[in-house]
Amino acid sequence: MLNIRNYINGHYCDPILGEWIENVNPATGEVYSLVARSAAPDVDLAVQAAADAFPAWSAMSAQNRSDILMAISRGIALHAEDLALAESADQGKPLSLAKKMDIPRAIDNMAFFATEILHTNTEAFQTSSQVMNYVVRKPLGVVGCISPWNLPLYLFTWKIAPALAAGNTVVAKPSELTPMTAFLFGQICADAGLPPGVLNIIQGLGAECGEAIVAHPQVTAISFTGGTTTGKHIASVAAPMLKKMSLELGGKNPTIVFDDVDVTQVAQHVARAAFTNQGEICLCGSRIFIQRNIYEKFREALIIETQRFVVGDPLLDETRLGALVNEAHMNKVLGYIDLAKEEGGKILIGGTRMHVEGRCAGGFFVAPTLIEGLDVLCRVNQEEIFGPVATLIPFDTDDEVIAMANSTAYGLAASVWTTNINRAHRTAHQLESGIVWVNTWLNRDLRTPFGGVKHSGVGREGGSEALRFFTEPKNICLQF
Ligand code: NAD
């Protein structure tokens, strides 16, 4: 069986304590590899390697760092097929989605920050004819990057690329549920000429090696993507140590459909927003608000679109919904469907575990599910489910839908569907959300600020925001 080892100081190594965790393919339910169960001593080694590598890496020219990051991007492209297969086996997502979305995005993340670093500038302030200020941006040192299981290599590289581009060295941890592509990424970095110690990849459990990264006194900043509860805990460890933090957390995103839209066309997009990647994307629209005079018509169109989300073996081309990431998560999602029934909801379609024949008989599949009849303030409409489950909620007026959309503790992303330009702008401005898409969803430009408000996070990733996070400004004031 394959052992998924740590990548420290430019080579692979076993965890010091010699412990391993079983890694399950969620589509089959079978253990197919073992993951290093790293602990504080492994993190110490990684931090030391990163600290040793920092002076040379941070002193390198932006062009030289850019060249290496571009070579890593090309390395991902070279191994795209294997990485897509690995992502699908670890996460349960359709192979076609990993090929179309996850791996291309990892390629783009590296290439984007490789070029972004060549096009940045810093500020200068002329105070008087004899006084001038200018700002230099310095890398932070050793930084920690911790990522979740839903878009494994996509989100892992989204943090690592700006951290490295800005001249930091990194100790990174992927989720213990999806360690494989980060493991393969180490070799790609080595082949691309990334100097030893610049990136160190530690595998293991969040509460053990994740927390050891957060608590390490030499780690100056933490970039974290994951659940809100974990984010709050990380903040409680890192804040008293006065570390810089970027927290990208959960969501309970509204999709708002006004009555002036083309129902059939918009239903397609709304279903995609609800069910892509089994609904396991922090940006998925899981609360669908529909203006009352098109409610019945839209509901029927949405049910038809939902039926098109074929659940099955992630390796098959026709599959649009793969397995949920593990059994515990599947049970959590099914638990929310039971709760919806208790809370008075009516299941319109789905609502059950799905059994797939053959190779995937032991897999963790849930049918795409639509529910109506729930109060907007009930738990199912307030808590993040993170699965293929969406609720339908009718509304009458613009003010009413904005109040309902804003009624959760979260504020990550929203989508608004209308052909009325005034309504589009007004609604977008009034939503408590870090990201609003109008007549589109998951339409990403890597230069834009990415992140949420309220319990969806602190700080922004993307473009210059990410480079600002991974650097510290120093103002130098000159009297001529
Ligand atoms: P999680 O919080 O359980 O784990 C995320 C990462 O944190 C994993 O690598 C885990 O091992 C690590 N971790 C856990 N406990 C830790 C601790 N005490 N100290 C340090 N590290 C620790 O989240 P998850 O279940 O992997 O991912 C799903 C969640 O991520 C959802 O809530 C989803 O909305 C969120 N998410 C947010 C975004 C975003 O950009 N806002 C993107 C993707 C996912």
Image (cartoon, helix red, strand yellow):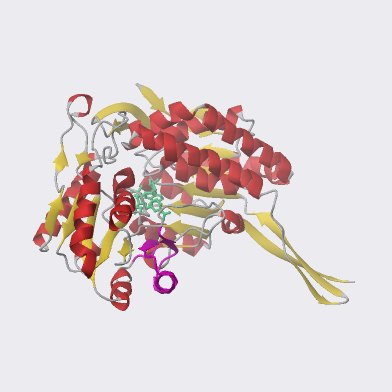
The answer to whether 303 is drawn above or below residue 91 in the figure is below
- Which of the 4 image quadrants contains residue 228? bottom left
Q: Is residue 419 magenta?
A: yes
Horizontally, residue 162 falls left or right of residue 30, namely right
Q: Residue at x 19, y 67 (%)?
A: 378
Q: Is residue 421 magenta?
A: yes
Q: Residue at x 29, y 38 (%)?
A: 320
Q: Nearer the viewer, residue 382 or 478?
A: 382
Residue that protrudes farthest toward the right in the picture: 480
Give the magenta-colored segment's residue range. 410-439
Work out which quarter of the rendered image holds the N terminus and state it. Answer: top left
**Residue 204 percent coordinates (x, y):** 39, 39
Residue that protrudes farthest toward the top in the picture: 1
**Residue 396 percent coordinates (x, y):** 24, 74
Work out which quarter of the rendered image holds the C terminus and state it. Answer: bottom right
Q: How many marks?
A: 0
Residue 396 in view here: yes
Residue 169 in view here: no
Horizontally, residue 42 falls left or right of residue 276, namely right
**Residue 10 percent coordinates (x, y):** 58, 31
Q: Residue at x 53, y 63 (%)?
A: 242
**Residue 347 percent coordinates (x, y):** 13, 54
Q: Residue at x 15, y 48 (%)?
A: 351
